[in-house]
Amino acid sequence: MPDDIINIDDEGRLIATARVRDRLRQRHGPWRVVPSVDNLIVLQRLDPGTSAPATATARAMLCGDINGTAPLIDIINFIASSRWTGVLSIVSAEVAQSIYFKRGDVKAASSNRRQDRLGDIIYRFGGATKEQLDNALREAGSGRKIGKVLVEKGVLNAHRLWQFIRTQIEEIFYSVLIIKEGQFFFYPRSDDEFHTNLTLSTQNLLMEGVRRVDEVAVFREKLPSARVVVALHQPQPTEVKLEQNEEKVLSFVNGIRTLEDIARESALGEFETTRILFNLLRSRFVAVVKEADIRDGLGVIDERLGNVIETFNSIFRKIYGEVSRKGKVSSLRAGLDAFFAGTSGFGELFASVHIGPEGDLDPGALLANLERATADNKVDFLYQGLNELLFFELFAAGETLDRAEEENLQRVLNDLFRELSSASDGA
C-alpha cells in the first residue's frame, strides 16, 4: 500500500500509514467532518474542549475535484464575480497552494513548492546571485524574512522587493491554472484578516493566465523545456528590426546558456524569455542546440564544455608566453598559486588544479571537479570560474610587465579574441 493512504474499514475506523500518522500528529486536536461530495472528506478544526470551530469562518463554502483546467478557471472567475473574501486552497498530489481573495481581488498567495518561494523567485528573475541568496538564507534562518535581509544587504531596494512579492503572487496564480488533477476548497475569511496593501485584479490575472496557457502549448513545440540550449543562427537576419527586450535576450545567447539561464540573467522570467526566444527562432536569429540534462542543468559533459576550456586555455597560453619571454614567469606562477589556494567561490572547480608548463589548465581535472561540484548550473559555474581566473591573470601579468609590454600583450589578446570570434562565426 502507498505510504500516503488512509484506509477506512467497514466499521468506519481509520487505518493510517506511518507517514500519514507523522503528518497528522502535527495537527493533533478535535476535528469535525464537514459535509462534502462523495469522493472527498473535509475536516474542520475545532477549539479544544468545545464544539465550536477554531475560527468562526472556517467552514468550506466550495469544494470539489479538479478535472482539467477549465473548471478551476471557472471557480476563480466565480469567486471574483461574486466579490467573495476568503482563501481558495488547491491540493494536487504533494503540492498545496492557496490564493487569498478580498472582495474578489487577489491579495496574496502561498505554496509549498520550492520554486514558488520568494528567494527562488528573486533568483530566477535575476534579482540576486546564488551566493547572495545563500548568504541571505543563512541569516534568514534565525527567523528574519529573506526579503528584508536582501534589502539590508543592499542587494535589493524596497521597491524591487515589492515587485518580486507581486511576481511571486502572479507566478503561483498562473501555476494554479494549469493544475489538471486534485481538489479545491474555498474558505471564507473576514476583511480585517488581510494585512497587505497589495491588490491584484483577478480578472486581469485570469486573462493573462489563460493567454499563457494557450501560448506555452505552442512554444513547447520548439522549446520543450527551460533546459533547452540555443545558439546564434548563422547568418544573422539583417532585414528584421528587434525590440529592446529581444536584443537583450539575444545578447545572452551563446550556445551554452539554457533558456532558464537566459531568463535569469535577462531578469525577464521564464515565460517572457520563452516567448521572445520562440519569436527569435521563427525569425532565424537563434537555433536550438540541444536540451541540457534535467538532473543538473549541465547536459552531458560533451565537446561544448571542452571547447569552453580550450578557448580559455588558448588565452592563458598567450598570456603565459608573453610573460615567460620577459623572464618574469616565476612571479606570475606565484600569483596563480596564491589564486588557487585562496579562491573561495570557485574552490570546487579549481581543487588540485595547477598551471601546466605552457600556462594552461588540465581539462580532465576541471571536468572531473565540475561533475562533483554542487553548483545549480554547472556550465555557468565553469564559465564564471575561468573568467575570474582570466581577470586575475591579466591583473597579475600587468603587475609583472612594464606599460609597453602590457600594451603589447593586450594587442596580442585582441588579435586572439578576433580569431576566436571569426572561428565561432564560421562554425
Image (tube, rainbow, N blue to C red):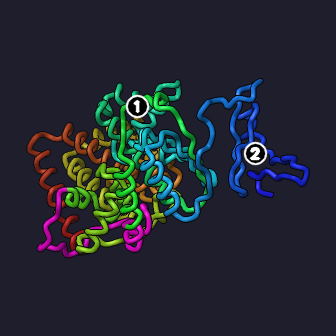
Find the magenta span and give its range.
Answer: 215-244
Look at the numbered disc 2 and give the secondary structure of its residue: helix
Q: Determine whether 61 is above or below 306 in the image.
A: above
User: Residue 32 appears at what percent x and percent y?
Assistant: 74, 38
Q: Determine whether 7 is above or below 22 in the image.
A: below
Kindly identify which numbered label has been placed on residue 196. Answer: 1
User: Residue 358 appears at what percent x and percent y?
Assistant: 32, 55
| Residue at screen point 50% across, 32% down | 190
| Residue at screen point 59% across, 49% down | 62
Q: Can I make out residue 357 in this image? A: no
Q: Amino acid at mark 1?
A: Thr
Q: Nearest the camera: 398 or 281?
A: 281
Local crowd at mark 1 within 10 Å, few (<14), some, or many (≥20)?
Answer: few
In magenta segment, residue 32: no
Q: Nearest the camera: 42 or 330?
A: 42
Query: Which picture quadrant has residue 127?
Result: top left
| Mark nearer the viewer, 1 or 2 | 1
Residue occupied by mark 2? 20
Kindly identify which numbered label has been placed on residue 323. Answer: none
| Residue at screen point 69% across, 34% down | 45
User: Residue 381 appears at what percent x and percent y?
Assistant: 40, 50
In magenta segment, residue 234: yes
Q: CA distance from mark 1 to mark 2?
A: 34 Å
Q: Relative to residue 50, is residue 343 drawn left or right?
A: left
Q: Relative to residue 391, is residue 364 drawn left or right?
A: right
Q: Nearest the camera: 235 or 302?
A: 235
Q: Determine whether 392 is above or below 140 in the image.
A: below
Q: Relative to residue 113, is residue 219 drawn left or right?
A: left
User: Residue 116 appears at what percent x and percent y?
Assistant: 48, 46
